[in-house]
Image (cartoon, rainbow, N blue to C red):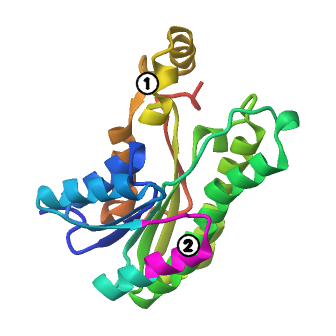
Amino acid sequence: MGVLNGKVAIVTGAGSGMGREEAILLAKEGAIVVLTDINEAAVQAVAEEITSNGGEATAFAHNVASEEDWIKVVDGTIQKYSKIDVLVNNAGISLAVNMLDTTMDQWNRVMNINVTSVFLGMKHVVPQMKEINGGSIVNISSIAGLTGGSGAGAYTASKGAVRMLSKAAAVDYGKFNIRVNSVHPGFIETPMSQDMVNNEKMLAWFLSQTALPRVGKASEVADAVLFLASDASSYITGVELPVDGGVTAK
């Protein structure tokens, strides 16, 4: 029996990388998973993988920076499954550009996808969670949301905003038994980071920053998400959980 049996979970950015692993693990643990991604073909493939292994999943093409798209996803989920127990705001992008060289278009894109998406997801899901007297929201930030980073001002600002927005929501909605926490991955091997991990000099730099002598796996981030989504963390809200191999400890 899975720890999420009977739960309905939305996972954004589920077409690849950490989002894919999170969706697959939540489904394995019994959740009905609603997967969303800007890449419709990719997210449909993940949904088919889940259903072929005995799980239940529905996929939506989803621009997470669009309020109209969020309304469609939430309404579609309620129409099909009647409730939402878990929201994982996973979708995001990176931008390795110095603050002084960042254009307004770059700034706005990072903020819209990384921060506005989290705001919109919570804005439209929290009322549904209030209807069932509880839920768990897990917002994926980054170690950049905990420490200052070099050469990525917009990205660092966006991930810091996710951290503090999560805390604000935890305080506001705890009285409705809605928990809100943030997860802060460090150097995680995903399709998006593959080129850096395969670069000998970059890999050496990664390893010089961690306490554990390796980069992390997307499945290890998924494990943290599962913990915060489940009743195993029923008295935990408003916290940031680093999954970083000890980067922030150093």
Q: Is residue 56 above or below residue 83?
A: above
Question: Where residue 127 appears, x then y in whole percent?
Answer: 51, 85
Identify residue type, mark 1. Val
Magenta stretch encompasses residue 215: no
Which residue: 65% across, 44% down? 145
Which residue: 74% across, 28% down? 150
Most extreme residue toward the front is 41
Residue 227 visible in rendering: no
Q: Which residue is mark 2?
A: 122
Q: Give the crowd class for mark 1: few <14, some 14-19, many >=20 residues within 10 Å.
A: some
Which part of the image, by quadrant, shows the C terminus? top right
Identify residue type, mark 2. Met
Question: Where residue 228 appears, x then y in whole percent?
Answer: 40, 58
Numbered range of the magenta stretch: 61-74
In the displayed structure image, the side of residue 129 where residue 141 appears, left or right:
right
Q: Is residue 160 above or below residue 124?
A: above
Question: Where residue 131 appears, x then y in whole percent?
Answer: 43, 90
Which residue: 75% across, 46% down? 106
Which residue: 62% across, 54% down? 114
Q: Which residue is mark 1?
A: 215
Magenta stretch encompasses residue 64: yes
Most extreme residue toward the bottom is 131
Most extreme residue toward the right is 100
Which part of the image, by quadrant, shows the N terminus? bottom left
In the displayed structure image, the side of residue 133 where residue 223 appears, left or right:
left
